[in-house]
Image: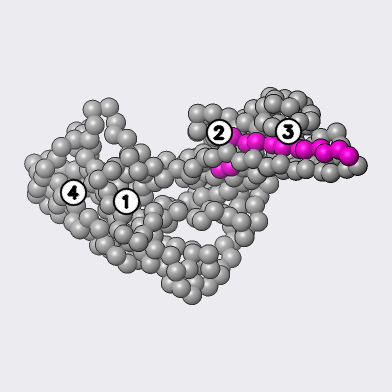
Amino acid sequence: MNARAAPAFGAVLVLALFGAGTCHALSLRSSAAELFLGDASPGTTVAVSTATGSELRVENSGRDPARLEFKAVSPPSGGLRDGFEPWPHPESVRVTVSRAELKPGDSAVAELAVTVPKDPALIGGQYEVDVMATGRDRAGASLTLKTRVLLSVGAPLPSAEATAGGFADRPGFALTPTSASGREAAVKFVNAGEEDLTVTLSPARDWSDDVRIPDGYEPAPNPRWLHFEAGTMRVRAGAIGRARIWADVPRESRYAGRRWAFVAAVDAVAGGRRTRRYFVLAVNTEKNLEEETRVR
């Protein structure tokens, strides 16, 4: 499976203050510099431990005791991860810490939970909120670690993992073409079988290993930029269905001159049995995209 979840990795920062004959070192280690919470719907709360299987852990790796504080802030637009926007509701992020006073070698476990407001304007976006962990020692020195917390708002995108029993073998169902280049493409669904099919198209964040991304392209940072005309349709037995697929990349300078591959999951269902095909759209963005401010 080709997973599109954002990677998590550790971070270590050390601050040394030199005085008269002494050296005080404040050092913190974080278990993750980036966490992806997945797809959340308006009105729900998503927690790091549920989404990733573990909490955020911050260790005092220095030689002196330290006091730890956490704060959630909206990131500046210049430091955003590709495909993400600043989370407009940092007040909706709750941080619960196991302990605040850390001796050398001690760790604090922080559970992060984000409540998504019932705001329709959030649907279809991907957002970043920065969680800042600040340690202070007795000498007055301070040091801050940043963890990017990423989430997508909207209906959950399909998982590459098949349901119990796997995907159905349906030789009579075909998708053509299976890939295209450009901002949009027209596709056909051939139902040569004897039963009617309900066909649904969805942007995919992860996919099976047999999907091939074209050379020189990388997976698009926001699968929700992929749109469909006739995203769900009924295809009768012996008939052909048609749909249009296009990518709508924001006209921002940070997305200019990029080569991205969007992947669509095409599911055909009949009698509770699901068959899946994938479609790949390779997109080159213009090199002179103009900045536009999105109003929410």
Label 4 sits on residue: 235
The kind of residue on which mark 3 rests is Gly
Q: Residue 84, image x and y in percent?
A: 53, 53
- Work out whether mark 3 precedes mark 4 in sequence or the reverse, and give the earlier one: 3
The kind of residue on which mark 4 rests is Val
Label 3 sits on residue: 62
User: Is 120 positioned to the left or the right of 227 in the image?
Assistant: right
| SS at badge 4 | strand
- Marks 1 and 4 close (CB-CB < 8 Å): no
- Work out whether mark 3 precedes mark 2 in sequence or the reverse, and give the earlier one: 2
The kind of residue on which mark 2 rests is Val
Residue 110 in view of the camera:
no
Label 2 sits on residue: 48
Quarter in which the N terminus is drawn: top left
Quarter in which the C terminus is drawn: bottom right
Q: Residue 256, image x and y in percent?
A: 48, 68
